[in-house]
Amino acid sequence: MKKHIIIFLAIIISFSLSANDNIKRHGISAHLGGTISLFEFGYQYNFLSLNNHQLSANIGINTAILSFGIPVGLEYSYGKNNKFILGIKAMPFWSIELFPGEGRMKPSPIMYSLKLGYGRMIHPKGQDYLLSFYASPVFDLDNKRMIPWGGISITHCF
């Protein structure tokens, strides 16, 4: 297993070294909706960029009233100004118990989310932003259920 991980990392590093340097590598995003949340803020790093194909890793923090989560995932996008977006996230989250233990944090099972969406690059005042709309159903494997979800986001690329 270690051998496979090392080979995978070597391939990713070699692709990113030969990738287009004109591409913006970092992104900070704000979501209305998100991974089973009301609001989500995140960071994205684009580690592979070949022609119109991009692969990025992301991490964030989100909230849904009395719970918060830390979604971590991978995202693939295809396109230059108009982008097709496909992603997957794993999210551990914690809920805040108000009763009976007044303010205790309760960990919940990890949930998984699939992201399917459309994004459009916009360039106000010479800055690069990605505006995206997406569906992101959440899968609770422990309870064998799927929760339909979605969101919109704006990502500042730099």
Image: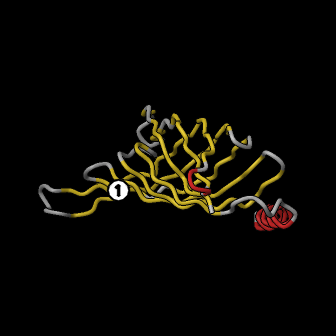
What amino acid is at disc 1?
A: Phe
Q: Secondary structure at mark 1?
A: strand
Question: Disc 1 marks which residue?
Answer: 68
Q: Residue at 58% across / 54% down in the picture?
A: 73
Residue 95: x percent and y percent? 29, 55
Q: Residue at 69% across / 46% down in the picture?
A: 76
Task: State left or right for residue 90 relative to residue 26.
Answer: left
Q: Quadrant for the N terminus, please.
A: bottom right
Q: How many marks?
A: 1
Q: Quadrant for the C terminus, please.
A: bottom right
Q: Residue at 41% across / 42% down in the picture?
A: 33
Task: State left or right for residue 59 relative to residue 11.
Answer: left
Q: Nearer the viewer, residue 105 or 122?
A: 122
Residue 18: which quarter of the image?
bottom right
Is 54 placed above or below 47 here?
above
Residue 77: x percent and y percent? 69, 44
Q: Nearer the viewer, residue 21 or 75?
A: 21
Q: Residue at 78% across / 55% down in the picture?
A: 49
Residue 150: x percent and y percent? 46, 36
Task: Estimate how packed mark 1 is, as few (under 14), some (14 to 19) or many (20 or more) residues with alpha carbons within 10 Å.
Answer: many
Name the image colouring: secondary structure
> Which residue ends up furthest to the front in the rendered image?
125
Task: State left or right for residue 96 relative to residue 71.
Answer: left
Residue 45: which quarter of the image?
bottom right
Residue 118: x percent and y percent? 60, 35
Residue 78: which quarter of the image?
top right
